[in-house]
Amino acid sequence: MEKYVWQHMRRDEIAEMRDHGAVVIVPVGSIEQHGAHLPVDVDIFMAQTVALAAAQALAPDVPVLVAPPVWTGVSPHHMHFTGTLTLSVDTFSQVLRDIVTCMWRHGFRHILLLNGHGGNDQTMKAATLQLGAEGIEVAATTYWDLAAAELAELVEGERKKVGHACEIETSMMLYLRQELVDMSTAVKDLGIPPTRLPTGGAVYFWPVFDPGTTGVAGDPTLATAEKGKAFLDAITKNLAEFIRTFHKTHIP
C-alpha cells in the first residue's frame, strides 16, 4: 500500500509512476467540529481513506498515486465551535492551484482533487476553472457525489445524503475508528444548514452553524459500523470506476 502514497516514495519512483500515466488523487478536507460525538478530522480522514481504498482496488491495473492531504479547508461557518481551523477562500484556492501546478510541471496529466468537506466545494470548483484558463486541466469532485444514488438507498434516516456528523459520516467512523466516536453524545438534528432562510435546490445560502446549535446536520443516532462498511464499499467502488475512466481520458 505504501507504493500509492506520494510522500512515502522516492523521486525516481514518483517519476516512474508519471511515466506510466498515473492518476494523482489529492485528498482535500478540513479540520472542523463534527458535533459532540466525532473528532475534528473526519473530513480529511475520510477523503484520504477513500482515496487509498480506490488506489488499492485498482492496483495493479491502473497506476494511482495518493498525494499528501490538504488537511485544512474553508470552514468559517464552523468557527463558533472550538477546534475548527480554517483558511480563507483566497488562501485555500491558491494552495490548491499551487499544488496542482507543481504536479502538472512534473508531467502528471491526470490529477483529481478529491474533496471530503462540503464547504470546500464552491472554492474548489472555482480553482479548477482558473487552472483550466491557464491551460492546466484538473478534475474535481466530492467523494460522496460519485455514489449519491447508492448511498441514498443505504441510508435509513430522513436525510438521504451526506450532511454533517450525520448517519453516513458517523457510520463510516464507527467502522474505521470506533475508539474516537462517542455515541452517547450523538443527537439528531435535521434543521441545519442553513438556518436563516428556507431554500430550494436552486438557491445557495451561507450554511452557518450558529452558537447554541448542535453542529449536526442529519441523524447520527442511526449510525452503525455495519452501515459504515456498506457506505465505504459503495463510495470506493464508484470512485474506482471514475478513476478507471479518467485514466483513459486524453489530456493534452
Image: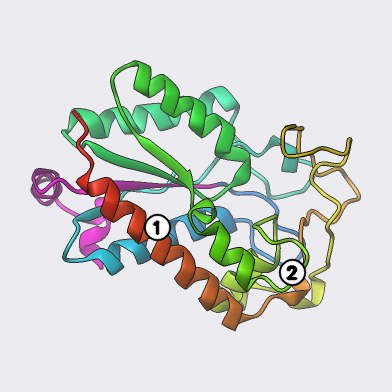
In this orientation, which residue lies closer to the viewer: 245 or 130? 245
Q: Quadrant of residue 173?
A: bottom right
Q: Quadrant of the C terminus?
A: top left
**In the displayed structure, would residue 145 be above or below residue 185?**
above
Q: Residues within 10 Å of mark 2 (few under 14, many from 20)?
A: many
Task: State the image coordinates of residue 118 (x, y, percent, origin top left).
Answer: 61, 45
Separation of disc 1 and disc 2 at Cα? 24 Å
Q: What residue is drawn where x is 65% and y is 57%?
A: 162
Task: Give the number of the mark in front: 1 or 2.
Answer: 1
Residue 228 in sight? yes
Q: Amino acid at mark 2?
A: Pro
Task: State the image coordinates of residue 150 (x, y, percent, origin top left).
Answer: 55, 66
Residue 176 in sight? no
Q: Which residue is mark 1?
A: 239
Q: Residues within 10 Å of mark 1 (few under 14, many from 20)?
A: many
Q: Quadrant of the N terminus?
A: bottom left
Q: Which mark identifies residue 208?
A: none
User: Total label count?
Assistant: 2
Q: Quadrant of residue 160?
A: bottom right
